[in-house]
Amino acid sequence: MAAYLMVDNEITDQALFADYIRDIVAVTEAHGGKYLVRGGAAEVVEGNWTPHRVVVIEFEDLDHAHGFVNDPNYVRLADIRGRSSVTSTVIVEGV
């Protein structure tokens, strides 16, 4: 069953965040991740969420999604992202 990594980034340091962006795609694709949403326009139609830069990545299953977030290359990049943005990330199992 597919799994989805959903991220909301409020970028605070664009120059440093660019370092994250430069390398994250290769790490994502190494785990079979496919970008479905990558920072396009977002519109809140219900609730009080204020989205910033929304990203949705599809993985084959939860094991692949967890393999991605536990990959040392991802952990290194997540540190860069953490210093350059305020980020919320969830993994959701699909149907």
Image: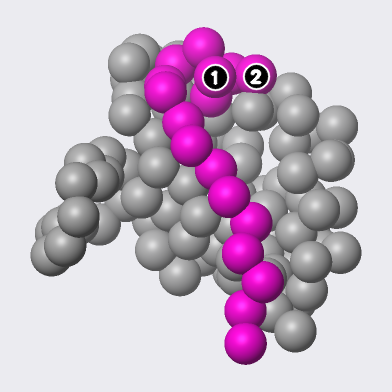
Instruction: Measuring from the top left, give residue 53's x and y in whole percent.
Output: 31, 43
In the image, residue 94 lies in the stretch drawn in magenta: yes
Density class for disc 2 (Cα within 10 Å; few <14, some 14-19, many ≥20) is few
Residues in magenta, as a range: 79-95
Say which amino acid is labelled 1.
Gly
Q: Residue at x 46, y 31 (%)?
A: 87
Residues 44 and 46: in front is 46
Secondary element at image label 1: helix
Instruction: Measuring from the top left, give residue 10's x and y in whole percent.
Output: 33, 29
Left or right, 89 with reference to 30: left
* Residue 30 in sight from this viewpoint: no
Q: Residue at x 61, y 41 (%)?
A: 24
Q: Are marks 2 and 1 in contact (CB under 8 Å)?
A: yes
Q: Which mark is residue 82?
A: 1
Looking at the image, which residue sits at the far front? 47
Q: Residue at x 66, y 27 (%)?
A: 77
Residues 47 and 35: in front is 47
Instruction: Measuring from the top left, give residue 23's x and y in whole percent.
Output: 61, 37
Quadrant containing the N terminus is: bottom right
Residue position marked by numbered label 2 in the rendering: 79
Left or right, 77 with reference to 7: right
- Above/below status of 90 relative to 57: above
Say which amino acid is labelled 2.
Asp
Quadrant hosting residue 59: bottom right
In the image, residue 7 lies in the stretch drawn in magenta: no
